């Protein structure tokens, strides 16, 4: 029979294996999100550089240089 844990308020929680699975899934999701965040941050920096380049080209075009 699956082991149940009883919290301080007397409610039972899922067995240890289920909790370990949830924790494992949450860790994997967090890692994936952090990796995605790092990629988005890098892409954002590239976009900022591209924006500055485009603004400079626009200024040159407007000034007739």
Image (spheres, helix red, strand yellow):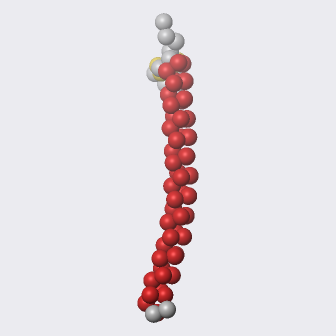
Residue 7 x %, y %: 52, 23
Residue 62 x %, y %: 43, 90
Q: Which residue lies furthest to the bottom in this view?
A: 64
- Determine whether 1 is above or below 35 in the image: above
Q: Residue at x 53, y 52 (%)?
A: 39
Q: Which residue lies furthest to the front in this view?
A: 65
Residue 61 relative to residue 46: left or right: left
Q: Residue at x 52, y 41 (%)?
A: 32
Residue 64 or residue 41, whichever sits in front: 64
Residue 3 x %, y %: 52, 12
Q: Quadrant of residue 61?
A: bottom left
- Determine whether 51 is above or below 17 in the image: below
Residue 9 or residue 59, whichever sits in front: 59
Quick check: can you spot residue 43? yes
Residue 20 or residue 38, whichever sits in front: 38
Q: In which quarter of the image is residue 64?
A: bottom left
- Determine whether 51 is above or below 61 in the image: above
- Determine whether 9 is above or below 34 in the image: above
Q: Which residue lies furthest to the top in this view?
A: 1
Q: Quadrant of residue 24?
A: top right
Quick check: can you spot residue 10? no
Q: Residue at x 56, y 52 (%)?
A: 38
Report the number of numbered marks: 0
Q: Residue at x 53, y 64 (%)?
A: 46
């Amino acid at each position: 029979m699956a082991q149940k844990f009883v919290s301080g308020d007397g409610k039972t929680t899922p067995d240890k294996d289920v909790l370990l699975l949830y924790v494992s899934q949450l860790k994997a999701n967090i890692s994936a999100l952090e990796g995605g965040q790092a990629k988005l941050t890098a892409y954002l920096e590239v976009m900022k550089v591209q924006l500055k380049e485009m603004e400079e080209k626009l200024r040159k075009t407007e000034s007739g240089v």
